Image: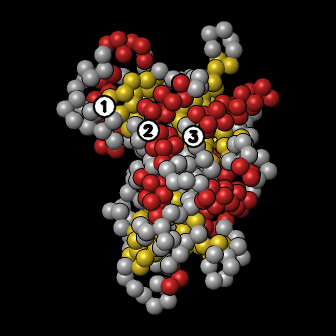
C-alpha cells in the first residue's frame, strides 16, 4: 500500500508492438475507471523503441482528430528486477518522483500484441515479484500465437477452422506464389485470410479473394511476424464472449455474448472498421437463442481453461450452420488482454451482464492480488 492507504496500481501501456496506439487508448479508459479513493495510479508508458517512461501531463490516451496516441517521452524509469524492490526505479531523478515510485502493489499491463500480451512482460513481472492483472507466461504466449492456440483448443475438443501455417514467411518463401500447395489451396478454398501468427487488432491481415493476391498478402503479414497463418473463411455470424475469473478463486464466469455486424459496404472487420470508421454495429447482448447463448458461454470457458488463462479473456467465434442444419460454433481467436477502449466489446459485454466498468477493473485487480501468494512461473 502507498502512504495514503490506497492500492498503488502501475498501469503500463504503449509498447513495442503494432498495437501501440490501441494500448494507449485502452489504458486511458482503465485509468479513468480506477477509483481515486481506492487506488493510486502510476501511469507507465513504453515507447515504441522499448523505453519505459512516466509520461508528461500532455500524454494523449485517446484518438484526437483522427490522430492515434503514442508514447514519446517522459521521465525514464525501469522495473526493479530484485523482488525486494517491488516496483520502479527512476533513471532520471526529478523532484518529488523518486520516493513515490519505490513500490508498486500491482501492475495492470494494458498491452496488446508482442512484448506485452505474449508472455514477455509477464515473465519480467514474475521475476520482479510483482502481482499483475491477466494470464501468466504460458497462457499469454500460447494465446498470442494463433498456431498454438488452435492446437491446444483442438486438443480440448473446441472446433477450429481449417488453416495452414507458413513458418518462414519473412524469408525466401515470401514472394513464392507456390508456397501454398495446390492441395492446400483446394482444401482452403477462397476467400482466405492471411494473418501474422502473433498479432492482433487485425493488423497485417489481408482478405484474399484471388490467389494472385496471395504473395503480397503473405508479405504484408510477414512484416508483422515471420510466421504467417492462412485461414479458410468461416461463414457465419461474428460472436464474442468475455470470460472473467470467478470471485474468491471460483470457476471462470462468462458474460452475455455480443455480435458484430458489418454495415453495408464494409467487407470485413479490419483495423479501420474497428477503430477509425463508423463501419460496424454491435448487438450487446447478441440476438441468440438461449441454447446458442449457453453454447457460446460454455465454449468460452472451455477455451479459457484449455489455454490455462487467468484473470480475463475474450473469446471470438463464428456461429454458422453445419451440413445437417445444426449450429456450428468455431473459435476464431482468444485474447488474454482484450481491448479496454470505450467501444471495446469486453467491457461492454460485462456491462450488459451487470458488471460495470469500474467493478470490472476492481475485480481484475483483486484477482491479481489474490494470486500474489502463488509460486512463480504461472
What colouring method underlies this structural image? Answer: secondary structure
**Residue at 63% in and 14% down:** 322
Rounded to the nearest whole Å, what is the CA distance between mark 3 and mark 2?
14 Å
What percent of the width, then of the height, locates residue 98? 46, 84
The vertical placement of 244 against 13, above or below, is above
**Residue at 43% in and 23% down:** 163
**Residue occupied by mark 1:** 167
**Residue at 27% in and 33% down:** 168
In primary-sequence order, the first of circles 3 and 1 is: 1
What percent of the width, then of the height, locates residue 62? 53, 64
Please state the total of marks drawn on the protein image. 3
What percent of the width, then of the height, locates residue 282? 67, 42
- Foreground residue, 163 or 204? 163
Residue 261: in sight, yes or no? Answer: no
Viewer-side label of 3, 1: 3
**Residue occupied by mark 2:** 145
- Foreground residue, 264 or 16? 16
The vertical placement of 209 against 261, above or below, is above
**Residue occupied by mark 3:** 308
- Foreground residue, 281 or 99? 99
| Residue that extends furthest to the top in the rendered view of this protein | 324
Rounded to the nearest whole Å, what is the CA distance between mark 3 and mark 1?
25 Å
The image quadrant where one finds the N terminus is bottom right
Q: What element carries label 2?
A: loop
**Residue at 53% in and 75% down:** 103
Q: Could you classify mark 2 by the number of other residues whose Cα lies within 10 Å: few (under 14), some (14-19), or many (20 or more)?
A: many
What percent of the width, then of the height, locates residue 73? 38, 74
Q: What element carries label 1?
A: loop
Viewer-side label of 3, 2: 3
In primary-sequence order, the first of circles 3 and 2 is: 2
Q: Left or right: where does residue 196 sit relative to residue 84?
A: left
Amino acid at each position: 500500500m502507498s502512504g495514503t492507504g490506497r492500492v498503488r496500481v502501475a498501469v503500463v501501456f504503449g509498447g513495442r508492438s503494432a498495437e501501440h496506439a490501441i494500448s494507449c487508448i485502452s489504458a486511458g479508459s482503465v485509468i479513468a475507471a480506477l477509483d481515486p479513493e481506492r487506488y493510486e495510479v502510476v501511469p507507465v508508458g513504453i515507447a515504441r523503441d522499448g523505453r519505459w517512461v512516466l509520461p508528461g501531463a500532455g500524454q494523449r490516451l485517446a484518438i484526437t482528430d483522427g490522430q492515434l496516441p503514442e508514447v514519446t517521452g517522459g521521465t525514464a524509469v525501469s522495473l526493479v528486477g530484485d523482488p525486494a524492490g517491488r516496483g520502479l526505479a527512476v533513471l532520471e531523478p526529478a523532484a518529488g518522483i523518486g520516493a513515490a515510485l519505490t513500490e508498486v502493489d500491482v501492475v495492470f499491463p494494458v498491452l496488446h500484441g508482442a512484448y506485452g500480451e505474449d508472455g514477455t512482460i509477464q515473465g519480467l513481472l514474475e521475476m520482479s515479484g510483482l502481482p499483475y492483472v491477466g494470464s501468466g507466461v504460458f497462457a499469454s504466449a500460447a494465446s498470442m500465437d494463433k498456431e498454438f492456440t488452435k492446437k491446444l483448443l483442438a486438443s480440448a475438443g473446441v472446433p477450429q477452422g481449417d488453416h495452414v501455417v507458413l513458418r518462414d514467411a519473412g524469408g525466401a518463401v515470401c514472394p513464392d506464389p507456390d508456397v501454398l500447395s495446390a492441395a492446400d489451396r483446394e482444401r482452403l478454398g477462397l476467400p482466405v485470410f492471411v494473418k501474422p501468427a502473433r498479432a492482433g487488432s487485425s493488423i497485417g491481415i489481408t482478405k484474399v479473394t484471388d490467389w494472385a493476391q496471395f504473395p503480397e498478402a503473405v508479405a504484408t503479414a510477414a512484416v508483422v511476424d515471420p510466421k504467417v497463418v492462412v485461414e479458410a473463411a468461416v461463414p457465419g455470424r461474428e460472436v464474442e464472449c468475455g470470460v472473467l475469473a470467478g470471485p474468491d478463486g471460483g470457476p471462470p464466469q462468462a458474460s452475455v455474448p455480443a455480435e458484430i455486424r458489418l454495415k453495408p459496404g464494409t467487407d470485413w472487420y479490419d483495423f479501420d472498421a474497428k477503430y477509425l470508421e463508423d463501419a460496424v454495429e454491435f448487438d450487446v447482448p447478441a440476438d441468440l437463442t438461449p441454447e446458442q447463448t449457453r453454447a457460446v458461454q460454455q465454449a468460452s470457458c472451455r477455451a479459457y481453461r484449455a489455454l490455462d488463462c487467468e484473470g480475463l479473456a475474450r473469446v471470438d467465434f463464428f456461429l454458422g450452420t453445419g451440413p445437417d442444419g445444426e449450429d456450428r460454433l468455431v473459435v476464431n481467436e482468444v485474447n488474454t488482454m482484450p481491448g479496454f477502449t470505450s467501444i471495446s466489446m469486453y467491457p461492454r459485454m460485462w456491462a450488459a451482464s451487470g458488471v460495470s466498468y469500474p467493478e470490472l477493473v476492481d475485480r481484475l485487480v483483486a484477482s491479481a492480488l489474490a494470486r500474489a501468494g502463488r509460486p512463480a512461473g504461472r
